[in-house]
Image (tube, rainbow, N blue to C red):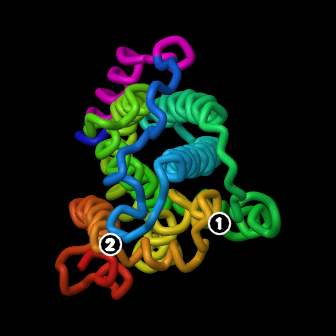
């Protein structure tokens, strides 16, 4: 058995040993009016005259946006893994077993996120629901991922590292609502294994990747990281719920030095995984999109 296979077998054992049912073990209710402290709101650093009630509403709306984005990302990940397994030749491979573990864990995460989303009672309208979005995803987005294993690995890393950083900040801040902190700590513990799995298989998949798979990893994934961080994690229409101009506020937020640095930090983490996997061998070989989002 290869070194990578042994690592994945350890992940399988950990997922079996550390099973958590969130509907039984991660329950509760909010105990604070403002669930997220001022300094962790996306608008921190802007000179906005918001009342305590508006800040409390914005905190709920931003959390709801993060949880909604998490649910939709996890469904995309589940679809990609299921597609790969349906084409897999060796069902005894530990990678096959771990994909089943990860799908099970992602469905539990999604059930928890949906429950918390309902408790938040968001008022926002979300531009990524309905309209032409499902058509674009079915014709372009999902086929791009499901048919390209290395790209899926890179998207998994991007989609896990971005919320992981935001959740770390929330979970560790003493003024975060305790229930929100508990949800984030539970999710981060299981996502750490998912990140380890993607890091382990990325090099294998990239070595066998088609030209279009490699092109997507090098040129499309960095654009997706920016879109995930700036558009889907906290979608622009959350600002409308507290009377702020949607797109002007969004443009100001994405240019805040703290937000720029958080985005770069997420991108650098994904880039390190790609470099460790042999996708990039020296900084001088980085395609322009990767240089732009990490510097």
Please say if 167 is above or below 244: above
In this view, the mark in front (1 or 2): 2
- Considering the whole magenta stretch, tell me its main secondary structure: helix
Residue 262: x, y in percent? Answer: 30, 63
Q: Secondary structure at mark 1?
A: helix
In the image: residue 247, left or right of residue 51: right
The image quadrant that residue 64 belongs to is top right
The image quadrant that residue 142 belongs to is bottom right
Q: Secondary structure at mark 2?
A: helix
In the image: residue 287, left or right of residue 242: left
Q: Earlier in the sequence, mark 1 or mark 2?
A: 1
Please say if 21 is above or below 208: above
| Residue in the foreground of this view, choosing between 11 and 251 | 251
| Residue in the foreground of this view, choosing between 261 and 93 | 261
The residue wearing badge 1 is: 141
In the picture, the quarter occupied by the C terminus is bottom left
Marker disc for residue 260: 2
| Residue in the foreground of this view, choosing between 87 and 38 | 38
Viewer can see residue 1: no
Viewer can see residue 199: yes
Q: Residue at x 26, y 34 (%)?
A: 174
Q: Residue at x 45, y 40 (%)?
A: 34
In the picture, the quarter occupied by the N terminus is top left
In the image: residue 67, left or right of residue 19: right
In the picture as drawn, the residue positioned furthest to the top comes out as 24
Residue 267: x, y in percent? Answer: 32, 66
Label 1 – label 2 distance at C-alpha: 26 Å
Q: Residues within 10 Å of mark 2 (few under 14, many from 20)?
A: some
Q: Residue at x 26, y 73 (%)?
A: 280
State the extent of the magenta-drawn residues as a range: 6-25
Q: Residue at x 80, y 69 (%)?
A: 132
């Amino acid at each position: 058995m290869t070194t990578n296979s042994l690592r994945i077998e350890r992940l399988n054992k950990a997922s079996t040993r550390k099973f958590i049912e969130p509907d039984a073990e991660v329950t509760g209710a909010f105990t604070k009016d403002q669930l997220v402290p001022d300094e962790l709101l996306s608008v921190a650093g802007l000179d906005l005259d918001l009342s305590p009630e508006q800040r409390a509403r914005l905190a709920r709306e931003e959390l709801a946006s993060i949880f909604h984005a998490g649910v939709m990302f996890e469904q995309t990940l589940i679809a990609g893994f299921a597609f790969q397994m349906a084409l897999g030749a060796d069902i005894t491979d530990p990678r096959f077993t771990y994909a089943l573990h990860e799908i099970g864990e992602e469905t539990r995460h999604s059930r928890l996120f949906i429950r918390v989303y309902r408790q938040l009672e968001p008022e926002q309208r979300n531009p990524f629901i309905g309209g032409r979005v499902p058509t674009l995803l079915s014709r372009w987005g999902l086929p791009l991922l499901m048919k390209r294993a290395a790209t899926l690995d890179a998207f998994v890393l991007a989609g896990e590292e971005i919320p992981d950083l935001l959740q770390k900040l929330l979970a560790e801040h003493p003024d975060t609502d305790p229930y929100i902190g508990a949800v984030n700590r539970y999710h981060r513990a299981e996502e750490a294994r998912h990140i380890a799995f993607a890091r382990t298989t990325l090099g294998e998949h990239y070595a066998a990747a088609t030209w279009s798979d490699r092109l997507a990893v090098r040129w499309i994934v960095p654009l997706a990281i920016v879109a995930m961080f700036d558009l889907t994690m906290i979608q622009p229409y959350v600002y409308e719920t507290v009377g702020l101009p949607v797109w002007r506020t969004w443009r100001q937020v994405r240019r805040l030095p703290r937000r720029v640095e958080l985005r770069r930090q997420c991108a650098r983490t994904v880039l390190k995984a790609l470099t460790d996997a042999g996708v990039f061998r020296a900084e001088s070989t980085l395609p322009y999109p990767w240089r732009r989002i990490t510097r």
